[in-house]
Image (cartoon, helix red, strand yellow):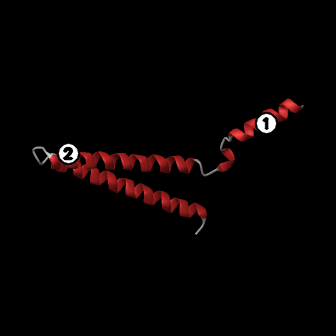
Amino acid sequence: MSRSSATRVLKLSVWAYAALMAAVGVLFIWLSTKPDGGFVKGFFQGGAFGLFALAVFLVVTSVRHSRRDDLSTMWRPSEDVRTEDASDER
């Protein structure tokens, strides 16, 4: 399995987990409307918020990591320091 296909499979599985968490979050929101109040309602509301936050985190990190696959375009502070030092020596 090449690196690009492994990365693609990993990204799809992360997106699937995020979609599953969002779906369970929607289910928790619906379940939180059933009880009148108390611990059970707060449990479902808190669980829904946590699942939504985790799903968003997974999607954002997946998108950010896919943009950073090409290391040649990354900016490194050490390259700027060396470039400035070299221009001062001339």
Residue 69 image offset from top left, x and y in percent? 60, 52
Disc 1/disc 2 C-alpha distance (Å): 56 Å
Residue 20 image offset from top left, x and y in percent? 33, 56
Q: Is residue 12 above or below residue 59?
A: below
Q: Residue at the spot x=69%, y=48% of the render?
A: 72
Mark 2 closeness class: few <14, some 14–19, many ≥20 residues within 10 Å: few
| Residue farthest front in this picture | 39
Residue type at tag 2: Gly
Query: In the image, is 35 to the left or to the right of 62?
Result: left
Q: Residue at the spot x=28%, y=50% of the render?
A: 25
Q: Residue at the spot x=28%, y=54% of the render?
A: 24
Q: Which residue is mark 2?
A: 42
Q: Which residue is mark 1?
A: 83
Residue 18 image offset from top left, x and y in percent? 38, 53
Query: In the image, is 38 to the left or to the right of 55?
Result: left
| Residue farthest right in this picture | 90
Residue type at tag 1: Thr
Assign a secondary structure to mark 1: helix
Between disc 1 and disc 2, the foreground one is 2
| Cβ atoms under marks 1 and 2 closer than 8 Å | no
Q: Is residue 2 above or below residue 29?
A: below
